[in-house]
């Protein structure tokens, strides 16, 4: 009894709720820090997913995300973002929680600028501005491509996306130097061929991975909200490796066994041995 009381006291000492960070939903996700979304007047029109509770020593890399259709709401794929954030990330989604307005690629830059400005202070004291990635789903993936030359990105994530206009594949893909990962949906995914074509047009020196998930993914997942288990685990491993420097998570990509077990096929990669990320 006494020991349990002491343990509880220690646990509560090490736990900080994010003072002032008002979660707008029940925290969830299978990671160590169940996450929920919030908003900030300093970043109008975007939705911010973060762990609801974490210890003061946790560092949160930043992921800025372009929504599907360049118009989905910031909560349309909430489950996916909560899952990612629960592993220790700040995920900023480039539309307001319930808006269905047209988004612009520049909003990804606005999000990165804002996150780096607030990182380390007040309710964002856990946020680590030195680690930042860009990603997006479908039309949002095209927005990630549009801003891909920003030198801040540690990596680029292309989720069921690719240049639909074949003439744009070489001009866009041949300029990518940062590690880039393609998560495609196979049958029923109109991005399957364009994404594969882009991968083939990358410089051979660019670290890259491509996989196709045929287990209920398609373009948008079984419920149209991008929630297939395979996409969630792959996205988490991508962020753990490239942003947290978790080399164990990297084996998901360097050794096909885990990805294959998760339902990924058509796996190919290049220059992954060039990826070295100092653990957080
Ligand atoms: C690194 O990633 C693996 C999953 O591949 C996970 O089991 C492990 O807990 C992670 N380590 C840390 C320190 O987060």
Image (tube, rainbow, N blue to C red):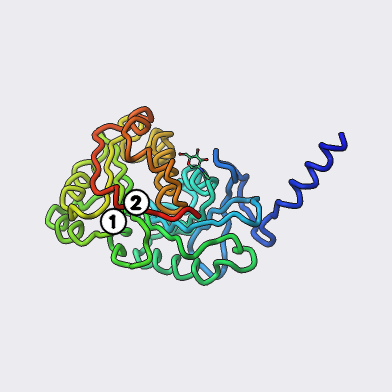
15 with respect to 250 (left or right)? right
SS at mark 1 in the image: helix
Do the numbered discs 2 and 1 sit on residues whose CB atoms are within 8 Å? Answer: no
- Residue drawn at the location 62% of the way across and 56% of the way down: 57
Whole-percent x, y for residue 149 in the image: 29, 66
SS at mark 2 in the image: strand
Q: Which residue is mark 1?
A: 142
- Residue drawn at the location 25% of the way across and 60% of the way down: 177
81 with respect to 158 (left or right)? right
User: Dot 1: within a 10 Å radius of its alpha carbon, few (fewer than 14), some, or many (20 or more) residues?
Assistant: many
Pointer 2 or 1: first along the chain = 1
Distance of label 2 from label 1 (alpha carbons): 10 Å
Whole-percent x, y for residue 257 in the image: 34, 30
User: In the rendered view, would you say 96 is above or below 76?
Assistant: below
User: Dot 2: within a 10 Å radius of its alpha carbon, few (fewer than 14), some, or many (20 or more) residues?
Assistant: many
Q: Which residue is mark 2?
A: 157
- Residue drawn at the location 33% of the way across and 67% of the way down: 150
258 with respect to 172 (left or right)? right
């Amino acid at each position: 009894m006494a020991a349990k009381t002491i343990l509880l006291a220690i646990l509560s000492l090490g736990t900080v709720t994010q003072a002032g960070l008002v979660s707008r939903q029940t925290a969830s996700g299978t990671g160590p820090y169940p996450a929920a979304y919030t908003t900030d007047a300093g970043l109008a029109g975007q939705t911010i997913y973060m762990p609801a509770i974490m210890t003061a020593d946790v560092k949160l890399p930043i992921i800025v995300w372009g929504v599907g259709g360049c118009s989905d709401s910031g909560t349309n794929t909430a489950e996916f973002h909560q899952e990612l954030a629960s592993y220790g990330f700040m995920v900023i989604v480039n539309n307001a929680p319930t808006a269905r307005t047209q988004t612009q690629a520049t909003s990804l830059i606005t999000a990165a600028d804002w996150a780096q400005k607030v990182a380390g202070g007040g309710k964002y004291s856990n946020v680590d501005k030195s680690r930042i990635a860009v990603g997006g789903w479908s039309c949002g993936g095209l927005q990630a491509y549009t801003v891909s030359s920003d030198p801040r990105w540690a990596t680029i994530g292309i989720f069921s996306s690719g240049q639909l206009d074949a003439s744009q594949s070489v001009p866009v893909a041949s300029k990518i130097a940062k590690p880039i990962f393609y998560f495609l949906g196979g049958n029923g995914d109109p991005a399957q061929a364009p994404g594969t074509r882009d991968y083939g047009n990358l410089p051979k020196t660019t670290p890259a991975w491509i996989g196709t998930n045929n287990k209920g993914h398609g373009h948008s997942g079984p419920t149209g909200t991008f929630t297939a288990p395979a996409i969630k685990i792959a996205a988490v491993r991508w962020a753990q490796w490239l942003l947290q420097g978790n080399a164990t998570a990297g084996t998901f990509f360097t050794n096909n066994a885990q990805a294959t077990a998760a339902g990924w096929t058509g796996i190919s990669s290049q220059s992954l041995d060039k990826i070295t990320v100092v653990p957080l």
